[in-house]
Amino acid sequence: MKQRIITGVIGAVGFIAAVIAGGSIFAALVTAMTITGAIEIARMLKLPALSAAGVLGIAVSLITFLPPSWADALGLSLESRVLAFIAAAWLLMLVPVATKNRVSFAVCGLLIFGAFYVGAGFHFFVHARESEGALFLFLALFAIWATDTGAYFAGRSFGRRKLWPAISPKKTIEGSLGGIVLAVIVGVTFQLMFTVFESWAVLFVFLLVVSTAGQLGDLVASAMKRQYDIKDFGRILPGHGGILDRFDSLLFVMPVLYVLQFF
């Protein structure tokens, strides 16, 4: 527990500082997180990170992740990025041929999907920081963290009915509702301190979306770990697991917010 707390505090301070700094510092940090997340997906599929498939998976993640400002600076159009994505995916189709099916088409397909999942989630994370600013991002982050905290304590105190035992046996309906309640409380407090939305109705919808999508993202990650019989995606964060263990909710939340045109 002590190691978990120390890692959490140091990681949170460094991460918050990078969000405030924005620009290349923030993008560089999230780039490293994207690469690490892609490696964790490869390892989940029992693929070495430096294998042909692993490297192509990282490439798919980075192509998907490329922040808008970086793409503009490099003169890369959306069409060129789509073509690069297709090229990397096409090369992955040759891996089963080259390995005589030791690496299956099913694994390569899941690698593409997982790499896209990681890259897209972190892409919209950076995009939100560039387009809406730090306060918007902090509101989303605090709502996600409040959901996790509220769900944990409400579940331990009042949890009786299982939410989805086949995927995550410890989660309860009472915990889920407690997470939403604390997310709303934290979000309203943040709004009173820093005006993020002009409309309170929009704020409440935003908080409900973030809290609900965050819990769905956590269930998605739990389903992946259960299917591949792993406890954590990685060990890069002592006491916390891997990058995907800590940011599974965010990877689901940010694309949802973009689709719903919150940024």
Image (cartoon, rainbow, N blue to C red):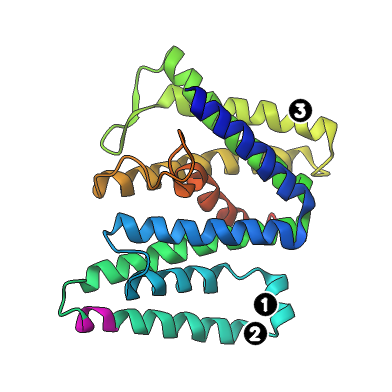
Q: State the residue at coordinates (66%, 44%).
A: 15
What is the tally of numbered marks visible in this picture? 3
Relative to 222, is 18 on the left or the right? right
Q: State the residue at coordinates (47%, 29%).
A: 176
Q: Is residue 138 visible?
A: yes
| Residue interval drawn in magenta | 94-98
Magenta highlight on residue 208: no
Q: Percent position (x, y) of residue 54? A: 36, 69
Q: Quadrant of residue 170?
A: top left
Relative to 95, is 102 on the left or the right? left
**On the image, numbered disc 3 is attached to which residue?**
189
**Amino acid type, label 3:** Thr
Tag 1 near tag 2, CB within 8 Å: yes
**Amino acid type, label 2:** Ser
**On the image, numbered disc 1 is attached to which residue?**
71
**Amino acid type, label 1:** Ala
Please report whichever mark, 3 or 1, sits nearer to the chain's N-terminal start. Answer: 1
Q: Which residue lies furthest to the top in this view?
A: 157
**On the image, numbered disc 2 is attached to which residue?**
77
User: Which label lies toward us, 2 or 3?
Assistant: 2
Q: Quadrant of residue 184?
A: top right
**In front of the other: 228 or 195:** 228
Q: Label 3: how many residues lie within 10 Å, few (<14), some (14-19) or many (20+)?
A: few
Q: Residue 143 carries which label?
A: none
Label 3: state its secondary structure. Answer: helix
Q: Percent position (x, y) of residue 142? A: 66, 36
Q: Label 2: how many residues lie within 10 Å, few (<14), some (14-19) or many (20+)?
A: few
Please report whichever mark, 1 or 2, sits nearer to the chain's N-terminal start. Answer: 1
